[in-house]
């Protein structure tokens, strides 16, 4: 292939990201004179499928951006616009699930998570998300199969999240044989995973290994902002170790940072 042809191909590739681009090759005449010779004008247009994919990605990104800053109505509008383009978009349903959850509409969120998992049966993130919702809504035993399915996705980058959820939810389901194995594997992949650290602290506490429980509890508090359940467990651990002052400090933090509004529940879940 001649050098000129290679340059043209490179330009074509660069223009492939736009919907419609016009390209004119201009070359000054080297034989003298003040005029230039202009080669033919070429137009490159994306096909309909490419435009559709670009529009879908745009709506998903805009929805995610709006969600991050708390503009839930805008986020929902963009997610629904994405579904008009692709009714089978698992990502759009996941966004709707997160939006519903932030509005306190847990039942509706579960329906959206389930739909995303149905549309993407081999996608680790969708399966992990639905499993985490099941576990957080009193269906811990049922959730375990979804984490197993998520871990079968070789391309899933957040394996530590699925393993942490699996170990935490196995503890809730009373399946002790899987708890420590899954949590330790999660921490081998991601040593500061908050879900795994909190679950390990609780697991050690339940098994009366209070020094180990304290170590995991302190690691959890260093890894991420405190939650009511984490502070409550920390106070209980210190109480068992006989450090009343430390236990009182955690109780005071709990009252200050999280004024009582309802029942404190133990455990965390991770939804990437």
Image (spheres, grey):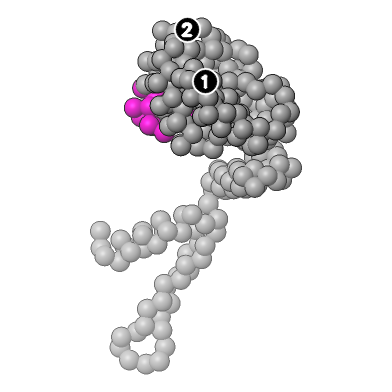
Which mark is nearer the camera, 1 or 2? 1
Query: Which element type, helix, strand or loop, lies under badge 1?
Result: helix
Q: Is residue 109 left or right of residue 147?
A: right
**Do callouts 1 and 2 mark residues in contact (Cβ within 8 Å)?**
no
The N terminus lies in quadrant: bottom left
Q: Is residue 95 left or right of residue 44?
A: right
Distance from label 1 to label 2 (Cα)? 27 Å
Q: Is residue 126 visible?
A: no
**Which x, y percent locates residue 48?**
58, 46
**Which x, y percent locates residue 43?**
50, 62
**Which x, y percent locates residue 184?**
37, 21
Query: Which element type, helix, strand or loop, lies under badge 2?
Result: loop
The residue at 56%/47% (across/down) is 54
Q: Is residue 186 magenta?
A: yes
Q: Quadrant of residue 101?
A: top right
The residue at 53%/52% (across/down) is 46
Neighbour tally class for label 1: few under 14, some 14-19, many 20 plus, Cα within 10 Å: some
Q: Return the residue at label 2.
A: 175
Report the number of discs.
2
Sequence-first tag of 1 and 2: 2
Q: Quadrant of residue 114?
A: top right
Circle on res. 259: none
Circle on res. 239: 1
The residue at 41%/72% (across/down) is 25
| Magenta span | 185-195
Q: Quadrant of residue 185?
A: top left
Magenta region, main secondary structure: helix
The residue at 51%/7% (across/down) is 174
**Which x, y percent locates residue 209?**
41, 15
Q: Nearer the viewer, residue 45 or 121?
A: 121
Q: Nearer the viewer, residue 161 or 19?
A: 161
């Amino acid at each position: 292939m001649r050098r000129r042809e290679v340059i043209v191909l490179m330009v074509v590739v660069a223009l492939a990201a736009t919907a419609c681009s016009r390209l004119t090759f201009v070359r000054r005449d080297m034989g003298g004179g003040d005029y230039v010779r202009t080669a033919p004008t070429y137009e490159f247009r994306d096909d309909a499928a490419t435009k559709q994919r670009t529009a879908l990605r745009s709506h998903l990104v805009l929805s995610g951006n709006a969600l991050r800053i708390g503009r839930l109505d805008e986020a929902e509008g963009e997610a629904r616009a994405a579904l008009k383009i692709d009714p089978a978009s698992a990502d759009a349903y996941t966004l709707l699930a997160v939006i519903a959850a932030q509005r306190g509409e847990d039942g509706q969120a579960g329906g959206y998570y389930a739909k995303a998992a149905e549309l993407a049966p081999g996608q680790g993130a969708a399966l992990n998300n639905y499993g985490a919702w099941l576990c957080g809504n009193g269906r811990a035993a049922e959730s375990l199969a979804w984490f197993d399915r998520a871990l079968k996705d070789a391309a899933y980058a957040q394996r530590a999240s699925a393993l942490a959820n699996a170990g935490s939810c196995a503890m809730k389901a009373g399946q002790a044989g899987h708890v420590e194995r899954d949590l330790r594997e999660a921490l081998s992949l991601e040593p500061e995973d908050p879900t795994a650290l909190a679950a390990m602290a609780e697991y050690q506490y339940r098994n009366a290994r209070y020094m180990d429980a304290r170590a995991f509890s302190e690691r959890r508090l260093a890894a991420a902002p405190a939650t009511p359940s984490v502070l409550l467990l920390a106070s209980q651990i210190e109480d068992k170790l006989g450090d009343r002052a430390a236990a009182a400090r955690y109780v005071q933090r709990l009252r200050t940072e999280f004024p009582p509004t309802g029942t404190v529940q133990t455990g965390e879940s991770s939804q990437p």
